[in-house]
Amino acid sequence: PRAPAATARASRAFPCAPRGRNGLSSSASSSCSSARPHLSRGAAVVLRASKSASSKPTATEMYLSLREMERLAAEREMACVANAVGVAQQTECTVAFLEEAEQIEMASLAAAAAGAEGAEGAGAEDDGKSGDRSFFHGKELKNYAGEAWIAPPKDRKKENDHCYAPKRCIHTWSGHTKGVQAIRFFPHHGHLILSAGLDSKIKIWDVHNSGKCMRTYLGHDKAIKDIQFNNDGTRFISSSWDKKLKLWDTETGKVIRTLTSGKIAYAVKMHPDEDKQNILMAAQSDKKILQYDMNSGDVVQEYDQHLGAVNTITFCDEGRRFATTSDDKSLRVWEFGIPVTMKYIADPSMHSMPAVTASPNGNWIACQSLDNQIMIYSTKDKFRLNKKKRFTGHSNAGYACQVNFSPDGRFIMSGDSEGKCHFWDWKSGRIFKTLRAHDKVTIGCEWHPLEQSKVATCSWDGTIKYWD
């Protein structure tokens, strides 16, 4: 008769739990696995209490059984709480582990990339301030005579003044991961060739001996737009889509000065006079031409007359004047140092001319017009258009394909959008030869300054080819 009283007291110990057949709560029967052995003992206690009803248990025994059940319930609750805390801690540790693993992976990838750059050659240079770096890939920085690696060879001389059109490809340089925007031979000697890549890297290659990359210059964050040597080749200037201009030391790879106006410089040009090698001209995307003094880094003159982005700067008349072309489809001539246009050429039939080159004798400038023709302007006779000389037959619409002359002025050449390189006879105006040079647009071409039959071309397929 007293066994139901024990069950009633057990129900008061679990007032919110539903009742089972033996009077226990269903929550107790569905507790955590860690508490299940204790619950089986508690159930045994209750069963013993109900079966011993005939033996009439004392109040002390009933009290002890209730205390045992309360203890087991507290243990079950503590076990559940501990289990939840453990799961939360495990989740937190897993998240922290994954974050740490990701950081370690990123660090290892960066170290691997740095190692790959360093594995290309010894002699890394870093200015430690802005992240400008340079890697030397050659064997020795100086030769047996103590001369720097950029010193021109003494056995290379100009053989004759007659140039010939090349016939075949004799070497291919492939080191840029993206397209090559521009190439420049080392001034007067051509034993090195400088390349500007769309992968934000500038590389200089050996032409005569090994044919390998000699140094890589890293400092820009975006694709390189233009590069230009000074007169002796010891320095060069680069412009990029990151809106910065950098003056580099060719030999050491160090950045001498970094300039920015907040706008993209589509073209850069150093003054051709020997006593004005500190003067830099930059054709800006904001319709201006800025004149910098590289010694101080200041803008000393601003030419602001164009109505569109300025694409080219070409010095003529021994550096006393320069011509500029723009997206406003005009050509303007300026007196150096005077920000007033002295000649303005515009016509409704004209197209934008994004590439201009002066002839070797300085009497003409060749302008790559976007209507698939090359226009010739005289620099002596008031910058008039020479209507008798107009070179056609190539397809360059939409691309700023570089146009260039042979050193003797006999040929004029240009790339096109189909990967070809065309050579025209200057006198007749007819196409003399066409080379199937690249798989993509042939954006740049340069004639070797000493070897009369050799030409270099570059393309957006990432290669530079050397032709003979």
Image: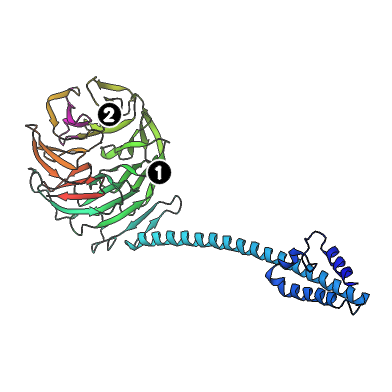
Region of the chain picked out in magenta, as a range: 358-381
Residue drawn at (10%, 34%) of the image: 426
Image location (x, y in percent) of residue 30: 71, 66
Label 2 residue SS: strand
Q: Which mark is residue 325?
A: 2
| 253 relative to 319 in the view: left or right | right
Front-most of 449 and 9? Answer: 9
Pair 2/1: label in front: 2
Quick one: label 2 or label 1, which is nearer the N terminus? 1
Image location (x, y in percent) of residue 377: 18, 27
| 330 relative to 363 in the view: left or right | right
Mark 1 = which residue? 258
Image location (x, y in percent) of residue 389: 12, 28
Residue type marked 1: Thr
Residue drawn at (23%, 37%) of the image: 401
Front-most of 247 and 54? Answer: 54
Front-most of 333 and 36? Answer: 36
Is 362 magenta? The answer is yes
Residue drawn at (28%, 33%) of the image: 312
Q: Residue furthest right?
A: 59
| Chosen colour scheme | rainbow
Label 1 residue SS: strand
